[in-house]
Amino acid sequence: MAAAVRLRGLHKRFPRVHALRGIDLEIAEGEFFALLGPNGAGKTTLISILAGLTRATDGSVSIMGFDVARQYRQARRALGVVPQELVYDPFFTVRETLRLQSGYFGLRRNDAWIDELLANLGLADKADTYTRLLSGGMKRRVLVAQALVHKPPVIVLDEPTAGVDVELRQSLWHFIRRLNRDGHTILLTTHYLEEAETLCERVAMLKEGRLVALDRTENLLRGGGGRRLVLELDVTELPASLRPRLTGRDGARFILDLPDYGDLEAILASLRQAGVGVCDMALGQADLEEVFLKIMHGVGHDTPEQA
């Protein structure tokens, strides 16, 4: 499959900071991709280079095959960016803002798509309201609409749900999923890791400007600690035969390693043999937040692999 975004040997140096250190990354057309990392990892710098707001020191970047430096017009048309910051002109209504944004891309008759954006983002009843009068959540919806107004094949969402309500979050993801099903490539950065875990097929993690993990989401989850069994027993000590499986304890609950679901019957048999009753039981698996913290603290995934 062709690459929607391709980074090769990407470096960005500022006077006192080496923000990006040799990033090699490809995002396929139609992929829903997460770029994660702590504050200061280089995510915003990378997005700024994609958008043409910052020039790379070394390396190359292309969007839909267009080099962002040499073929900047085509690269800009292929990209829509939803920034973290609330940036708006207070003297235009929502509809005027979207018409103006359409004009930047030479789109003169774009009202049908603008109406569809307004409806899908819950802005239809605010179309003739000045942006300065909107709530923070509504202003963020306008930013999303601006990024999508020219129907870019690649959409970058930089913390799109930061500080917004549950209703907006759900409606936004419903619409973005639809765009992804229609073939749009989505690049998401977020601190809400459950969003990335639910939505994204692959995940890349940055740390201090370096790519420290790159894999399919399910592979990262599988390698992040695997399955576990949480047991609440009618005794205060775990039977000796099960102690090698013990990975932690939370009050009266024992947390056991469970490499395979087939091991569950053997564990229950050991408890029955020891005369131990089970008061409560739950199965769990490491989530992306646990995997992220593990990788950021330097455990595993030192060499990212393309999956």
Image (cartoon, grey):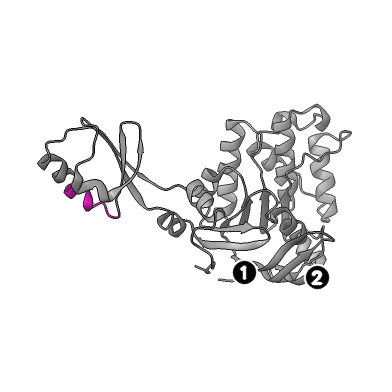
Q: Residue at x 75, y 57 (%)?
A: 45
Q: Nearer the viewer, residue 164 or 226?
A: 226
Q: Residue 262 magenta-drawn?
A: yes
Q: Secondary structure at mark 1?
A: strand
Residue 191 image point, x, y percent: 61, 44
**Residue 6: quarter of image:** bottom right
Q: Nearer the viewer, residue 152 or 190?
A: 190
Residue 215 as seen in the image, left or right of residue 23 = left
Q: Nearer the viewer, residue 59 or 115?
A: 59
**Residue 52: quarter of image:** bottom right
Residue 142 image point, x, y percent: 74, 39
Q: Residue at x 76, y 48 (%)?
A: 110
Q: Residue 77 magenta-drawn?
A: no
Residue 231 image point, x, y percent: 27, 37
Q: Which mark is residue 276?
A: none
Residue 241 as seen in the image, left or right of residue 203 = left
Residue 86 image point, x, y percent: 77, 39
Residue 107 at least partly seen: yes
Q: Crowding near pointer 1: few (<14 within 10 Å), some, many (20+)?
A: some
Query: Residue 122, relative to residue 77: is it above or below?
Result: above
Q: Secondary structure at mark 2?
A: loop
Residue identifier under label 2: 71
Residue identifier under label 1: 3
Q: Residue at x 83, y 34 (%)?
A: 93
Whole-angstrom CA distance, mark 1 to mark 2, is 16 Å
Query: Residue 7, relative to residue 198: is it above or below?
Result: below
Identify the mark nearer the N-term, 1 or 2.
1
Task: Give, as a single range, the part of the protein colored magenta.
Answer: 259-266
